[in-house]
Image (cartoon, helix red, strand yellow):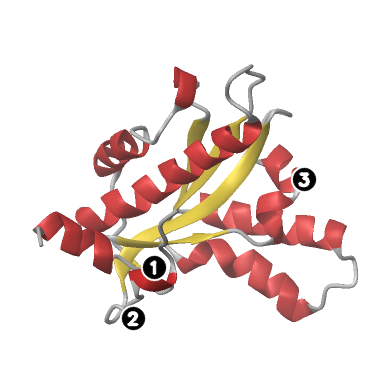
């Protein structure tokens, strides 16, 4: 088996991330990988918003405020979790899909393309010596969060990619049998 296949088969998410994160020059290379996602009709339906340093605190305030709009009875623990969420990594990338009306490319394909771009970020970050995790949760589907991030009406959040350096060892990942997921027709 090639080194590339072994790398791809062993990549896993890292929920504990610390400094350093990829710097802006490294992120340009990572984004070049993301932009190689399958893209029917060359719509380029994705874009990326980076959030680092003190802007993570500002995003945490947005997430807390939007939580309170969704759930005015949220307790202090939930509010703290929302506020501190963006601080779990030194860099966040918000993956955004821009939905276009196209006769041959339905919205689901455009969302899947942006999802592939998100996976490209995770793979390229890991190949560059970093680690990451893709998170969604209620904020990813909250129009108030989208508005606060400056998304247009035809845009949605695909996910929040948390990036940094892996803290501790990689978690063990189960070896799945292809026989459980692959069949012939």
Image label count? 3
Name which residue lies at 44% across and 28% down: 39
Binning the other alpha carbons within 10 Å of mark 2 as few (below 14), some (14 to 19) or many (20 upward) gives few
Secondary element type, mark 1: loop
Residue contact between numbered discs 2 and 3, judged by CB atoms under 8 Å: no
x, y percent for residue 26: 24, 43
Does residue 145 appear left or right of residue 46 in this picture?
right
- State whether residue 150 appears in this view: no
Of pointers 1 and 2, the one earlier in the residue sequence: 1
Q: Quadrant of the N terminus?
A: bottom left
The mark found on residue 141 in the picture is none
Question: Circle 1 sits on which residue?
Answer: 13
Secondary element type, mark 2: loop
Q: Is residue 76 above or below residue 82?
A: below
Name which residue lies at 85% across and 59% down: 70
Front tag of 2 and 3: 2
Question: Circle 2 sits on which residue?
Answer: 171
x, y percent for residue 128: 20, 53
Residue contact between numbered discs 1 and 2, judged by CB atoms under 8 Å: yes
Of pointers 3 and 1, the one earlier in the residue sequence: 1
The mark found on residue 144 in the picture is 3
């Amino acid at each position: 088996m090639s080194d590339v296949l072994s790398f791809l088969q062993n990549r896993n998410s890292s929920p504990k991330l610390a400094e350093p994160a990829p710097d802006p020059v490294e992120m340009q290379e990572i984004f070049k990988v993301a932009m190689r996602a399958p893209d029917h009709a060359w719509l380029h339906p994705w874009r990326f918003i980076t959030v680092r340093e003190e802007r993570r605190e500002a995003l945490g305030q947005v997430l807390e405020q939007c939580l309170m709009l969704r759930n005015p009875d949220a307790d202090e623990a939930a509010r703290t979790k929302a506020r501190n969420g963006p601080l779990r990594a030194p860099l966040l990338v918000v993956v955004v899909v821009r939905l276009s009306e196209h006769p041959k490319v339905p919205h689901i394909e455009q969302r899947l393309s942006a999802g592939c771009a998100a996976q490209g970020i995770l793979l390229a970050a890991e190949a560059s010596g970093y680690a990451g995790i893709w998170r969604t949760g209620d904020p990813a589907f909250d129009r108030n969060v989208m508005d606060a991030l400056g998304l247009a009406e035809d845009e949605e959040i695909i996910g929040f990619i948390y990036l940094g350096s892996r803290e501790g060892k990689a978690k063990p990942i189960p070896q799945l049998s292809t026989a459980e997921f692959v069949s012939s027709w």
